[in-house]
């Protein structure tokens, strides 16, 4: 597992103070009573009765999403949040290759289908995640590539079949597909190709970087109506040099010029309070991708911080929640300000399910809901941001 999402040098500790002041400046009271409209002062917007994130976002034309774990859907509290607060869902792991085809030739669609059925029942769209990624590939494949019993020519045939079979299986049910995930080099990667693609990435190493464009072509042939995304981290706002974003931009421009069927760029949006982040840079990077005629999306937003333990996930810094709220809100604002930003997805419903404690030692509290499924300040911050945005709809 790559541990380095959004890795930059820590900020001066007290930068948090400025963050808190900024968070306070946007604080407005949310009233959820049905009769709020009758008390609204002249010239002010009444607060809607439904203050779910999906309802607040509706007037802006933006969909708010969440990654879900289908094993948790039997918990009514979890299901109520997943179905009630969000208007798009992403299966957190169930469409990844190791889950879809754990044994070669035997497909295991049921968990992913459960997510699709849940979405259908709740008027939600689905982000398919992900077809071409170096992680969570089945061991029958990596073992045989490693020992040479699958040649590179055979690997190409196998990956083509994987993309076509999976996209075809879900044809008509997927709004956006993350066709390729995390193919670009970070500043710490040893072997970037001249255009910034990671030469050590599994698929690139074996099949050359042209495999990315081919995956888009195969996916498009299998479902011409799905929006096809390239998805990555540190590609809008987190990396001060912006080098990775520049490389993705130049590559996407080339793909468009060559007629490769790419529809969008997904910024994962995994943030960490110990590193720098600029909402302004995020907005301008997203706008730049949009300038190529592409859609954009925030696909995996979460904001982690240091916590007491993985079980309880109480931040160790008393100012952390304010910083987290502020960064979540800035990410959402950046998306709202770019008309082509069509969805803002948070990664995991609650802290109990978050990938963060298992991936980043000592960190957690990265989602909108705590380990007891109680909404946190971060949730309220997103409500407030959406409430403000509803006054200036994007469509
Ligand atoms: C993570 C899941 O949340 C974990 O449950 C799993 O063990 C590993 O993958 N970038 C991605 C996501 O594109 O697929 C990752 O999801 C988080 C980082």
Image (tube, rainbow, N blue to C red):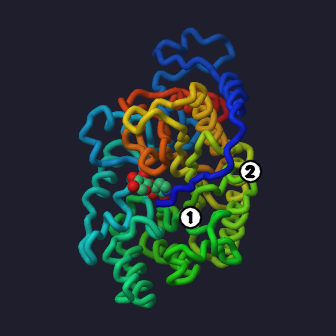
**What residue appears at the point 56 percent right and 64 percent down from the top-left corner?**
230
Which percent across, then down, holds residue 29? 58, 17
Q: Taking the image as drawn, is residue 35 in sight?
A: yes
From this view, report whether residue 202 is shown above or below residue 28.
Answer: below
Q: Name the residue carrying label 2.
A: 284
The residue to which callout 1 is attached is 230
Counting the numbered discs, the total is 2
Determine whether, in the image, residue 88 is placed left or right of residue 47: left
- Identity of the residue drawn at 57% across and 54% down: 5
Report the side of 20 relative to 310 (left or right).
right
Q: Is there CB contact under 8 Å for labels 1 and 2?
A: no
Q: Which x, y percent locates residue 227?
A: 51, 62
Residue 90 spot, x, y in % from top left? 42, 52
Could you tell me if residue 127 is visible in this image? no
Against 170, residue 375 (above or below) is above
Q: Is residue 161 left or right of residue 392?
A: left
**Quarter, ligand 1:** bottom left
Q: Secondary structure at mark 2?
A: helix
């Amino acid at each position: 597992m790559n541990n380095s999402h959004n890795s930059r040098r820590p900020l001066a500790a007290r930068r948090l103070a400025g963050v808190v002041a900024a968070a306070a400046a946007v604080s407005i009271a949310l009233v959820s009573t049905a009769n709020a409209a009758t008390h609204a002062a002249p010239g002010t917007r009444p607060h809607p009765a439904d203050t779910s994130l999906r309802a607040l976002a509706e007037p802006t034309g933006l969909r708010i999403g969440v990654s879900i774990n289908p094993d948790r859907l039997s918990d009514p509290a979890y299901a109520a949040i997943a179905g009630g607060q969000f208007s798009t869902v992403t299966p957190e792991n169930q469409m990844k290759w190791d889950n879809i085809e754990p044994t070669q030739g035997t497909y295991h669609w049921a968990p992913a289908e459960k997510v699709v059925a849940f979405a259908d029942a709740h008027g939600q769209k689905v982000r398919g995640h992900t077809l071409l990624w170096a992680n969570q590939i089945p061991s029958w494949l990596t073992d045989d590539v490693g020992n040479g019993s699958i040649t590179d020519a055979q690997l190409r045939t196998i990956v083509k079949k994987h993309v076509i079979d999976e996209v075809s299986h879900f044809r008509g049910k997927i709004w956006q597909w993350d066709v390729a995930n995390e193919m670009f080099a970070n500043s710490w990667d040893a072997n970037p190709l001249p255009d910034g693609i990671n030469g050590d990435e599994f698929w690139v190493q074996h099949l050359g970087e042209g495999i990315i464009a081919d995956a888009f072509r195969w996916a498009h042939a299998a479902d011409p109506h799905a929006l096809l995304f390239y998805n990555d981290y540190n590609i809008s706002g987190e990396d001060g040099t912006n080098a990775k974003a520049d490389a993705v931009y130049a590559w996407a421009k080339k793909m468009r010029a060559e007629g490769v069927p790419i529809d969008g760029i997904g910024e994962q949006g995994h943030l960490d309070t110990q590193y720098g982040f600029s909402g302004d840079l995020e907005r301008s990077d997203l706008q730049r991708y949009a300038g190529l005629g592409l859609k954009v999306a925030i696909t995996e937003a979460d904001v982690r911080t240091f916590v007491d333990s993985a079980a309880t996930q109480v931040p160790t810094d008393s100012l952390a929640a304010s910083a987290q709220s502020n960064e979540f809100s800035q990410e959402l604002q950046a998306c709202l300000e770019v008309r082509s930003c069509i969805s803002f997805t948070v990664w995991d419903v609650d802290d109990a399910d978050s990938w963060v404690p298992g991936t980043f030692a000592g960190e957690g509290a990265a989602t909108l809901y705590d380990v007891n499924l109680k909404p946190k300040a971060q949730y309220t911050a997103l409500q407030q941001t959406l409430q403000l945005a509803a006054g200036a709809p994007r469509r």
